[in-house]
Amino acid sequence: MESMASKLRNGKHLHDASKFNKDAPKRLGESLPDGGGKKRILGDITNRAPATKGKSDPNLVTKGKFDSKKNLKTKSENSTNLDSENINKSISLRSQSSKSSSSEESVMYITAMETNDSIMDVSSIKEEIESVADSPCRPEGVEDFDATCIEDPSSVPQYARDIFRWYREREKQFILVKYLDKQKEMTKSMRAILVDWMVEVQESFELNHETLYLAVKLVDMYLMHNFVAKSKLQLVGATAVFIAAKFDYKTQRILETEIKILKAINFDLGVPLSYRFLRRYARCARISMEMLTLARFILETSLMDYELIDVLDSKLAAAALLLALKMKDMEWTPTLDYYTEYKENELQDLVVHLNRNISVPPNKHLQTIRMKYSHEIFFHVAKIPPLKLSRNGQLEKAQ
């Protein structure tokens, strides 16, 4: 364990501290830029035929196969006593129509598309998107955050709420249960040390935060079903990081363990992560970057806490944000009620637990997260005093 950490610290991949938060601008809940720079997502939506086809006679549409069928239908509907001559004419017309060359038929189809030779009006599409984004059940006074992003295709505002509803349903498929009673060589402290090392890997190699959260989740999902010897624990952690980020680590052993982990989770990596929920909540409530970073510190600390592995990720993210707000003398708002779908009183017990996590000084083996968030790039949020638990069980600011 120690040798790997030392290798990482001294390796060529270690980066300057100024690069720690490479993806920080992506996480900011600021308003979207207006003006230029928008991507054109519809492309060329005209039905123009290629120029090489040449121009065709518009009258072909009314002279050919289609008009013959129309005339036949009209005659059959309006004439109750067709004589044999008319029947023969009808048969003749059908026969002539069926003998049309394939090239002429192709020209007719192209001409049919050219009858309205103009660019499609997309105003109706925009109106439809706006109507989908505007949720009718939003309480009065709660900003429709997604509507403010309607001009930004990268935010997919017309689908965002449905996506996170789907996440809420899907996270029920990944509920963990406590497993240490089956792991005879592992303790809570050992798990915390492993996660601390994984955080160090994420930080050193500038991996996405989602990669870290997914890797920790994979470790827990694997350990829930499989016994792992103490000597193999770091291998499982490294393999989980590899699966999440495809980072090289002794290829043959990694591949063997990767197969085992993927089989254990049925090859389903689409796990709803607390980090994603937190970003969504912060954006919808327009939380400042400093406040979001404080919530991230609280949430990242929770990764080391075995007692929290069976808590829904959406709830864990909401509780971390609520604690961060309380530490900054801010309130849980109707907007957060609406977008998180959690009431403040539903989160109280979890908030107390998270506050206790950041209140206890970490031992010498669990310093990585605290050191990471003590840096100026992360607004020194790890140095903000945690709340104090009063005698009546309420959290309040320390004097």
Image (cartoon, grey):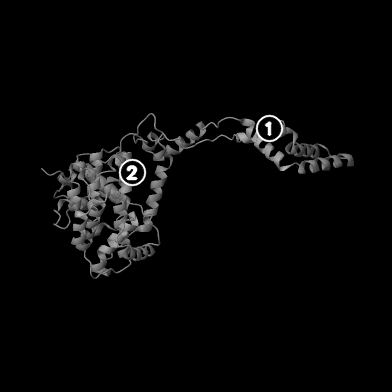
Nearer to us in this view, 105 or 74: 105
- Image quadrant holding the C terminus, namely top left
Q: Which mark is residue 366?
A: none
Amino acid type, mark 2: Arg
Residue at (30, 46) in percent of width and height: 278
- In the shown orientation, is residue 11 left or right of residue 43? left
Q: Is residue 217 visible?
A: no
- Cα–Cα span, label 2 and label 1: 54 Å
**Between disc 2 and disc 1, whose residue precedes?**
1
Residue picked out by circle 2: 280
Give the image location of residue 93, x and y in percent.
Answer: 81, 40
Q: Nearer the viewer, mark 2 or mark 1?
A: 1
- In the shown orientation, is residue 258 left or right of residue 364? right
User: Residue 233 appears in which quarter of the rendering?
Assistant: bottom left
Residue at (40, 60) in percent of width and height: 267
Amino acid type, mark 1: Ser
Residue at (19, 53) in percent of width and height: 368
- In the shown orientation, is residue 374 left or right of residue 109? left
Q: Which mark is residue 56?
A: 1
Mark 1 residue element: loop
Give the image location of residue 224, x and y in percent.
Answer: 31, 65
User: Hey, which residue is sitting farthest bottom in the picture?
Assistant: 184
Residue at (39, 30) in percent of width and height: 36
User: Hey, which residue is sitting farthest right in the picture?
Assistant: 84
- Using a 10 Å C-alpha cutoff, classify the residue at mark 2 as few (fewer than 14 neighbours), some (14 to 19) or many (20 or more): many
Q: Is residue 211 visible?
A: yes
Q: Is residue 248 above or below residue 394?
A: below
